[in-house]
């Protein structure tokens, strides 16, 4: 009996040894195959690099010969390359191989290949897309020719240009008098970045701006006043309104189920208002939507403006005022004013790349009894997925690096009276629900900053 048990134990040991040996052999074969594939890939990359280098040397020699023959004024150019089939073939092969050498874009990166720089665009892909906002027109396009790229870049530059108006002191008022223009101090370098936030509590911004039906009839040509009005509060240079009035007009109408908006930008810095209205006037013949800009303090003048048929209010990237919460735009009183001018079904859209500010705006609006989350918009646009820590991205640049002071008039979610909603997380939209963008959206993509967006609806 003992000898039988011993033989059985030896048999078990032999089976275990065979199993271990098979696993070891399999692992060795897998590692060998991986090493072979890696070596093959390395050899392919080496051959690709060598061919690229050889083509660059050959093309450089062609450039030198051409310029020597055409001296003293001749320089190689696209036309010269196109005139020589062999030269053109080498040039196209080089560009094709450089594209192959670039591989694939990083995870979350814009998928547009920048031929001139021989790499992919380093901006973050726009929310809800595969390319950044600047390269959005190329999504789904198989053949991107240099002429198409140039046309798109020219179009983007056209929309971002700031048209300097005559100094008439109008501050966005249609038909306003210019009698006080000499007394106003005007900033002239508005094409540059605005570095200082305007204090909304300054005495000159405390008088409400009162407008009447006659004003709006002049602004929107009377018969068009019945169209729903979309208001962008704190519009800055008006990039969002300009986009909605031009290239993004049809996409916005499609996204909003056929709604065609009148567009209004509200900005406290009056020189930007005058410049934006000058831009509208200069491009009136090509715009697809009616747009207008007015200058005032929205926190003081919102209800006094008597805006016709308001249906949507957008507050995008407002000044954070990190240590002066009383200067922020979205306050409980401001939301009460929004409830007063919006009808049932009216929309509020807020966003910021400063998370603390976005959370505060979310809480202020959602805690108002007149507003709830716009579930239809969340269902249509989708919710922001949990993203990897952007700090590991080389281009990441945090939006807010200062101590944040919470607004004491906003209820704290950690307070005991919150009740059952205490543990409900905030929900962020995956993209802009109006299928357009602001200048700040482009900045955030370049710096890989997440943008926190929310949409509420008037009940």
Image (cartoon, rainbow, N blue to C red):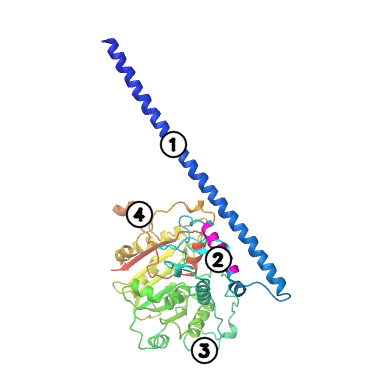
- The secondary structure that dominates the magenta segment is helix
Q: Magenta segment, which residues?
A: 86-100
Question: What separation in Å lies between label 3 and label 2 (alpha carbons)?
Answer: 60 Å
* CA gap, disc 2 and disc 1: 41 Å
Total labels drawn:
4
Q: Nearer the viewer, residue 131 or 381?
A: 131
Q: Position of residue 1 (x, y in %)?
A: 25, 10
- Which x, y percent locates residue 425? 35, 54
Q: Residues within 10 Å of mark 1 (few under 14, many from 20)?
A: few
In the structure shown, which secondary structural element does the residue marked by tag 3 occupy? loop
Q: Which residue appears farthest toward the left when viewing the image?
A: 1
The reply to whether discs 2 and 1 touch (Cβ–Cβ < 8 Å) is no
Asked whether the residues under the numbered discs 1 and 4 touch, taking CB atoms below 8 Å apart as contact, a structural biologist would say no
| Nearest to viewer (mark 1 / mark 4) | 1
Marking on residue 92: 2
Proximity of marks 4 and 2: CB atoms separated by less than 8 Å: no
Q: Which numbered disc covers residue 177? A: 3
Q: Residue furthest top?
A: 2
Give the farthest residue toward the front. 86
Residue that badge 4 annotates: 425
Checking the image for residue 29, the label placed there is: 1
Distance Cα–Cα, label 3 vs label 4 = 51 Å
Sequence-first tag of 4 and 2: 2
Q: Which mark is residue 265?
A: none
Is disc 2 surrounded by few (<14), some (14 to 19) or many (20+) residues within 10 Å?
A: few
Query: Considering only order in the chain, which callout, 1 or 2, is on the residue closer to the N terminus?
Result: 1
Q: Quadrant of the C terminus?
A: bottom left
């Amino acid at each position: 009996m003992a000898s039988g048990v011993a033989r059985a134990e030896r048999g078990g040991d032999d089976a275990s040894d065979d199993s271990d040996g098979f696993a070891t052999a399999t692992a060795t074969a897998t590692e060998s195959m991986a090493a072979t594939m890696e070596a093959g890939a390395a050899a392919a990359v080496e051959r690709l690099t060598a061919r690229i280098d050889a083509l660059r040397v050959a093309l450089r020699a062609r450039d030198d010969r051409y310029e020597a023959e055409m001296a003293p004024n001749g320089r190689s150019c696209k036309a010269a390359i196109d005139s020589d089939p062999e030269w053109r073939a080498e040039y196209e092969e080089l560009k094709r191989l450089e594209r192959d050498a670039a591989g694939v874009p990083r995870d979350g990166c814009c998928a547009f290949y920048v031929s001139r720089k021989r790499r992919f665009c380093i901006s973050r892909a726009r929310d809800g897309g595969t390319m950044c906002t600047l390269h959005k027109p190329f999504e789904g396009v198989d053949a991107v020719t240099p002429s198409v790229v140039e046309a798109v870049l020219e179009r983007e530059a056209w929309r971002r240009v700031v048209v300097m108006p005559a100094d008439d002191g109008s501050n966005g008022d249609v038909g306003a008098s210019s009698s006080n223009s000499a007394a106003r101090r005007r900033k002239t370098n508005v094409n540059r970045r605005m570095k200082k936030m305007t204090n909304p509590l300054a005495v000159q911004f405390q008088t409400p701006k009162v407008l009447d039906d006659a004003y709006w009839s002049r602004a929107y040509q009377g018969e068009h006043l019945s169209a729903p009005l979309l208001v962008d509060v704190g519009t800055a240079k008006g990039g969002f309104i300009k986009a909605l009035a031009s290239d993004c007009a049809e996409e916005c109408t499609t996204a909003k189920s056929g709604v065609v908006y009148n567009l209004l930008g509200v900005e406290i810095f009056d020189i930007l208002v005058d410049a934006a209205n000058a831009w509208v006037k200069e491009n009136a013949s090509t715009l697809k939507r009616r747009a207008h800009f007015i200058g005032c303090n929205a926190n003081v003048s919102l209800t006094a403006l008597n805006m016709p048929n308001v249906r949507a209010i957008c507050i995008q990237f407002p000044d954070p005022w990190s240590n002066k919460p009383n200067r922020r735009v979205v306050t409980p009183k401001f939301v009460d004013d929004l409830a007063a001018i919006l009808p049932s079904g009216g929309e509020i859209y807020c966003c910021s790349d400063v998370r603390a500010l976005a959370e505060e705006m979310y809480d202020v609006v959602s805690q108002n009894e007149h507003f709830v989350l716009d579930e239809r918009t969340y269902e249509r646009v989708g919710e922001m997925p949990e993203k990897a820590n952007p700090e590991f991205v080389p281009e990441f640049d945090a939006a807010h690096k200062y101590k944040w002071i919470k607004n004491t008039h906003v209820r704290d979610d950690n307070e005991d009276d919150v009740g059952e909603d205490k543990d409900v997380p905030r929900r962020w939209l995956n993209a802009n629900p109006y299928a357009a963008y602001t200048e700040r959206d482009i900045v955030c993509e370049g710096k890989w900053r997440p943008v926190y967006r929310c949409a509420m609806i008037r009940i």
